[in-house]
């Protein structure tokens, strides 16, 4: 292997997780990910970075959205994946010089390769996927000092050279909870969505998080697949139900794996005032409603094994009507396949 290949495939970092770490909180909608982010937000050894690619995904010229969303932030319509990536790299450089680790929260749906997204659909989809944005890692150079076009085999739009440097925490939650929660939040923030659209369905499936997990165990952590549930190993799989109902154990496991002092974790906080919330965009108020109104961890009340899509669907009928309830049930059942696969590896 040449020096250039060594840098390109990232083996100089992936062979061992040296400090400081680049923790990627690989999130999925409505999985209690805001709780984990909140608890590590003020850790003295961590620097948080959230949703770097949100604007590029939602509003920029490379947006995968079929609808035109009005940006609530000036300049968001000019955001590109390359700009977001360069910004993230600059942030990493500054923070790592301080000796801190980075806690990067990013929905996989914001950075998923459009072709991988289209291929993950369990339903016929005759639309051609949009071109994958080209993102170049300027930190990867040849021996001649020229920037190389970096390899990309991972399911995101970002180069392998960068993805190999990350230590992923992949967060999931039982579809009986996550699917209905996302629909409910969409209704409150933007009005009832078209839940029969293929794009809506794909947002609820765990196909993309599974792609991320499988890529890491094939290319970066080849021994991970043989490690049983409960083991502390990258890529770490975290269930939102475990986080809310067995918080101390889960947080302790993460701190142990990441070599973080558990005393730096936040367990109590002040609720966000109504005055502050009233000035937030509606979608922010909606999606952060639980964490902003809380003062600590709130248990869900479900015990492992109690959750049933059939039972939850009965509640959805009363809340949303039979047509929506039946569709949510179909989506939740479709999401169960990849959820169960990932669940077998969860801490």
Image (cartoon, grey):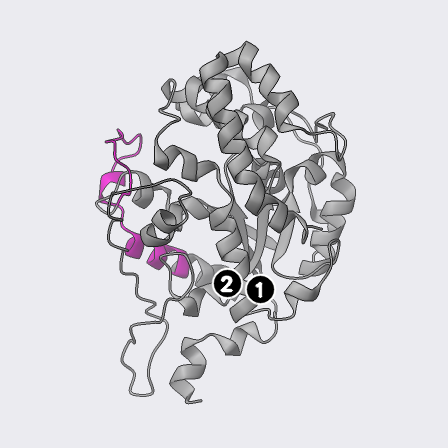
Say which residue appears at 67% left-offset and 26% top-offset.
295
Location of the N terminus by quadrant is bottom left
**Cα–Cα gap, marks 2 and 1:** 28 Å
Say which residue appears at 70% left-offset and 27% top-offset.
300
Left or right for 214, reference 139: right
For label 1, the SS is loop
Q: Can residue 347 be seen in this snapshot?
A: yes
Question: Mark 1: few, some, or many residues within 10 Å (few <14, many ≥20)?
Answer: few
Left or right for 27, reference 18: left
Residue identifier under label 2: 215
Residue identifier under label 1: 99
For label 2, the SS is helix
Observer-side mark, 2 or 1, equals 2
Return the x and y of residue 169 as percentages of the image width and height: 59, 52
Return the x and y of residue 37 as percentages of the image width and height: 58, 42
Q: Is residue 156 above or below residue 126?
A: below
174 inside magenta stretch: no
- Range of the magenta residues? 63-89
Return the x and y of residue 253 as percentages of the image width and height: 74, 53
72 inside magenta stretch: yes
Res 234 → quadrant = bottom right
């Amino acid at each position: 292997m040449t020096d250039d290949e060594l840098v390109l495939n990232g083996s100089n970092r992936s062979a061992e997780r040296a400090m400081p770490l680049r923790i990627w909180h690989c999130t999925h909608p409505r999985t209690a990910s805001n709780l984990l982010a909140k608890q590590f937000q003020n850790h003295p050894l961590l620097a948080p970075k959230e949703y770097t690619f949100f604007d590029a995904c939602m509003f920029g010229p490379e947006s995968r959205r079929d609808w035109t969303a009005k940006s609530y932030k000036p300049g968001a319509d000019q955001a590109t994946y390359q700009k977001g990536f360069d910004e993230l790299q600059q942030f990493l450089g500054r923070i790592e010089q301080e000796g801190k680790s980075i806690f990067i929260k990013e929905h996989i749906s914001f950075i998923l390769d459009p072709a991988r997204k289209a291929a993950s659909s369990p339903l016929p989809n005759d639309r051609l996927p949009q071109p994958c944005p080209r993102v170049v890692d300027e930190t990867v150079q040849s021996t001649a000092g020229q920037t190389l076009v970096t390899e990309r085999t991972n399911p995101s739009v970002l180069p392998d050279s960068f993805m190999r440097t990350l230590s992923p925490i992949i967060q999931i939650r039982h579809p009986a909870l996550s699917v209905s929660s996302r629909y409910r939040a969409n209704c409150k923030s933007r009005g009832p969505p078209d839940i029969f659209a293929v794009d809506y369905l794909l947002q609820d499936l765990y196909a993309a998080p599974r792609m991320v997990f499988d890529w890491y165990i094939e290319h970066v952590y080849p021994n991970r697949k043989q490690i049983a549930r409960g083991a502390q190993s990258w890529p770490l799989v975290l269930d939102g139900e475990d986080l809310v109902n067995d918080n101390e154990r889960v947080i302790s496991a993460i701190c142990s794996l990441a070599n973080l002092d558990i005393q730096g974790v936040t367990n109590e906080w002040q609720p966000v005032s109504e005055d502050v919330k009233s000035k937030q965009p509606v979608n922010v108020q909606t999606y952060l409603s639980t964490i902003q109104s809380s003062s600590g961890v709130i248990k869900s009340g479900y015990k492992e094994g109690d959750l049933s899509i059939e039972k939850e669907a009965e509640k959805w009928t009363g809340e949303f009507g039979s047509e929506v309830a039946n569709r949510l049930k179909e989506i939740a059942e479709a999401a169960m396949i990849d959820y169960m696969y990932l669940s077998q590896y969860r801490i």
